Image (cartoon, rainbow, N blue to C red):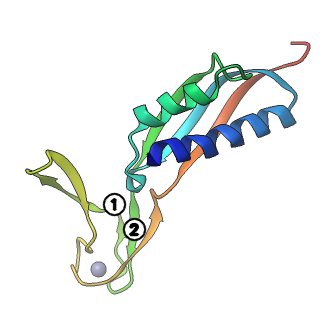
Amino acid sequence: MHEMSVAQGVAEAVLRGARREGAVKIIRINLEVGQLTFLNPEQVIFWLKELFKNTEAEEAEIIHKTIPARVRCSKCGYEGPLQVKEDPLFHQALPVFACPKCERGSLEILEGRDCIVSSIEILEEGE
Ligand SMILES: [Zn+2]
């Protein structure tokens, strides 16, 4: 239930942020889901909708965008996406954690590890 705990964190951040801005209603939530979180965005959204019941975000539209991974190689300096290979056993595209250029260096992950709220649209009191 990885998705549920992530959704809980996201829901708290959204509601806290919206209340600070004096929101009476949350209209839209834009999520960025990193490729390396291995989250199922549909599952995250499902839990968010559950958590938002009876809150300002009950009717919010939730939009997600997948952020591809970006890595840097400590050996050759390669910077860019991870290689992805098809796993015939699971019918899934799995990232390969080896440098696509020299295949030796250790990779530092620059992007793609987080699930974040990139923005929310709210309706303020009196609008
Ligand atoms: Zn390398």
In the picture as drawn, the residue positioned furthest to the bottom comes out as 75
Q: Is residue 37 left or right of residue 13?
A: left
What residue did someone put label 2 on? 71
- x, y percent for residue 89: 9, 51
- x, y percent for residue 63: 52, 29
| Badge 1 residue CB within 8 Å of ligand 1 | no
**Front in this rendered view, residue 46 or 94:** 46
Residue at left offset 23%, top offset 71%: 100
Q: Which quarter of the rendering shows the C terminus?
A: top right
Q: How many marks can you see?
A: 2
Q: Amino acid at mark 2?
A: Val
Residue at left offset 63%, top offset 20%: 60
Q: Amino acid at mark 1?
A: Pro
What residue did someone put label 1 on? 81
Q: On screen, 120 above or below 9?
A: above
As measured in the structure, the alpha-carbon distance from the residue carrying label 2 to the one carrying label 1 is 6 Å
